[in-house]
Image (tube, helix red, strand yellow):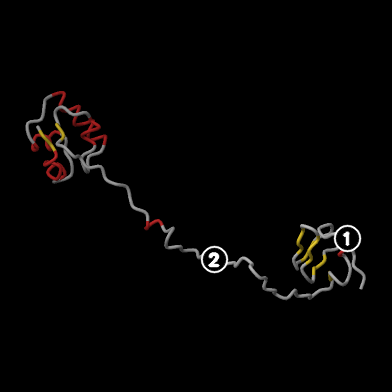
Amino acid sequence: MTIDINQPVRLKQILVDGTNIYYPRTYQPGELPAAYLNESFVDQGEGLVVPAISYQNSIQVQEVKISPVDPVASPTSYPGPTPVVATKKVEINKDPATAISALPGIGSAIALKVVEQREAKPFDNIEDLQTRVPLSKGSWQKVAPNIAF
């Protein structure tokens, strides 16, 4: 059989050419030196299977399987946002809106409304606050331990 140098060839064995090492696989035209393009080193026939060869001191390849659901990367494994909790009592009649909005369950819109209402008249107690800045039932009562008047 004649080797066509314009077609891919399969190397049958390991070849060492100076510092170059060629392993058994399919090579495209121009990848192998012309000296090795003969029937004793390469083949172009269909169905040629290069036998698996174990090499001494070779690197072991570990197969990694990726599944659509990876428990390490699932969104449920990441911690959620840490809630901001006031560490000191908020002076409802003095502190800025940012301090008021740090109370659990109180957003920036409610905090701005509190500031607006206290400018007209300072709050006397939690009931006065609930009356002038209404929230769902019991919301101000839940944060009452964190509020000072």
Q: Nearer the viewer, residue 135 or 35?
A: 35
Q: Quarter holding the N terminus?
A: bottom right
Q: Rounded to the nearest whole Å, what is the CA distance between mark 2 and mark 1? A: 38 Å
> What amino acid type should be assigned to the residue bearing mark 2?
Val
Residue under the image location 16 percent in, 44 percent down: 139
Picture quadrant where residue 105 is located: top left
Question: Can you tell which mark lies on residue 145?
Answer: none
Residue 57: x and y in percent read 63, 68
Sequence order check: which comes first, mark 2 or mark 1? Answer: 1
Mark 2 highlights which residue? 64
Secondary structure beneath dot 1 equals helix
Amino acid type indicated by mark 1: Ala
Which residue, as the protein is rendered here, is positioned at the far right? 2
Mark whose residue sits in front, 2 or 1: 1
Residue 8 position by quadrant: bottom right
**Which residue does the numbered mark 1 point to in the structure image?**
34
Closer-to-camera residue (77/126): 77
Residue 79 vs 114, above or below: the answer is below
Mark 2 falls on what kind of element? loop
| Residue drawn at the location 8% of the way across and 38% of the way down | 127
Q: Nearer the viewer, residue 87 or 40?
A: 40
Q: Residues within 10 Å of mark 1 (few under 14, many from 20)?
A: few
- From the top left corner, tell me how far across and down residue 136 is, in percent: 18, 44
Along the horizontal axis of the image, is 97 left or right of 123?
A: right
Instruction: Give the x, y percent position of residue 11.
Output: 80, 68
Residue 36 image-quadrant placement: bottom right
Q: Residue at x 90, y 65 (%)?
A: 4
- Graded by Cα atoms within 10 Å as few (under 14), some (14 to 19) or many (20 or more), the crowding at tag 2 reads few
On the image, the x and y values in percent for residue 138 come to 13, 46
